[in-house]
Image (tube, helix red, strand yellow):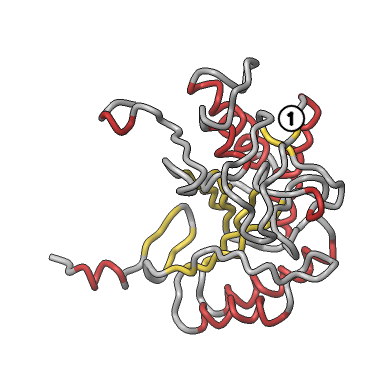
Amino acid sequence: MKTDDNVLFSPLTIKNHTFRNRLGVAPMTRMAAGRDAIPHQDVLDFLVRRAENGAGLVYTEAIVTDYESAQGYPNQSRITTQRQIDAWKQVTAALKRAGAVSIMQLFHCGRMAWEDVNPAGRVIAPSPLAPQQVNPLNGDPYPLPEEMSAFDIEHVITGFAESARGAAAAGFDGIEIHGAHGHLISQFLSSYSNKRTDRYGGSLANRFRFAREEIIQAVKAFIPAHTLLFFRISIGAFQTCPYRCFPAARNGRT
């Protein structure tokens, strides 16, 4: 019988990728990219050192998926240009040499943003509802977001697909779609922040359509079959910005 310690340090195989143990480096938003949206070298070196010190899995920080409206924090990273791909390619090669599996996390901040931080000066969301909380980065209330049009939705989906293609070109073993913590995808999932009356709102199936039928499928079309694909989801979000994907969950129903 295996002890917990034995399980923690035992290998795990998913598809054709073997994790040498169950220890991983979580995605951490560092806000340390330059104007080229490439993280500073010390950030990249940090990831490699974690692998050299024994981590079996290493995530990147969350990478924003387009230049128009995805960004919610200053100095975030992207992976849609050749320079960005080449920079990350050095990291994935070093992680592989150190024996770790590399995962790139992709996300769009949606309404958890403000105009000044996005190159196009836009904040978009499923519905024109601002978060209740104050923006912790500038101390101001979050602005009222624009309700996403059909074009906006298609543009965001394309951003995820292009970023996934960049991640694959950079040699990442896997991709995680960030659908949690109150960012854009979870804004669609939640009846609290999604008041749409079209095919993306209302029923649980409609609210999951943006993620399940469109973003995930678009990403899968741009990555090799052997690439790992994960989806991150949470039941709730920020304490001062409450929502539930499953409103009746507290009563034991889904």
Up the image or down, 145 lies above or below 169; here it is above
Q: Position of residue 81 (x, y in %)?
A: 84, 58
Say which quarter of the image contains residue 202: top right
Give the quadrant of residue 214: top right
Q: Is residue 205 above or below residue 223?
A: above
Would you name the residue on which mark 1 appears?
148
* Residue 134 placement (x, y as % from top left): 61, 51
Q: Residues within 10 Å of mark 1 (few under 14, many from 20)?
A: some
Q: Residue furthest front?
A: 140
Q: Is residue 97 left or right of residue 246?
A: right
Q: Is residue 94 left or right of residue 19?
A: right
Q: Is residue 93 left or right of residue 86?
A: left
Q: Is residue 242 visible?
A: yes
Type of amino acid at the residue the image marks with label 1: Met
- Is residue 34 depicted above or below 105 in this figure? below
Front residue (pair 128, 97): 128
**Residue at image coords 66%, 76%:** 44
Residue appearing at x 78%, y 55% in the figure: 117
Q: How many marks?
A: 1
Give the residue drawn at x 43%, y 54%. 14
Above-or-below relation of 155 to 248 = below
In this view of the protein, can residue 231 be seen by the observer?
A: no
Please state which of residues 133 and 153 is positioned toward the viewer in this rendering. 133
Quadrant the N terminus occupies: bottom left
* Observer-nearest of 130 and 250: 130
In the image, 52 versus 107, the foreground residue is: 107
**In which quadrant will I find the C terminus?**
top left
Q: Mark 1 falls on what kind of element?
A: loop
Which residue lies at the image location 48% right of the left edge and 23% below the top edge?
Answer: 204
In the rendered image, residue 194, in percent from the top left (x then y), is placed at: 58, 28
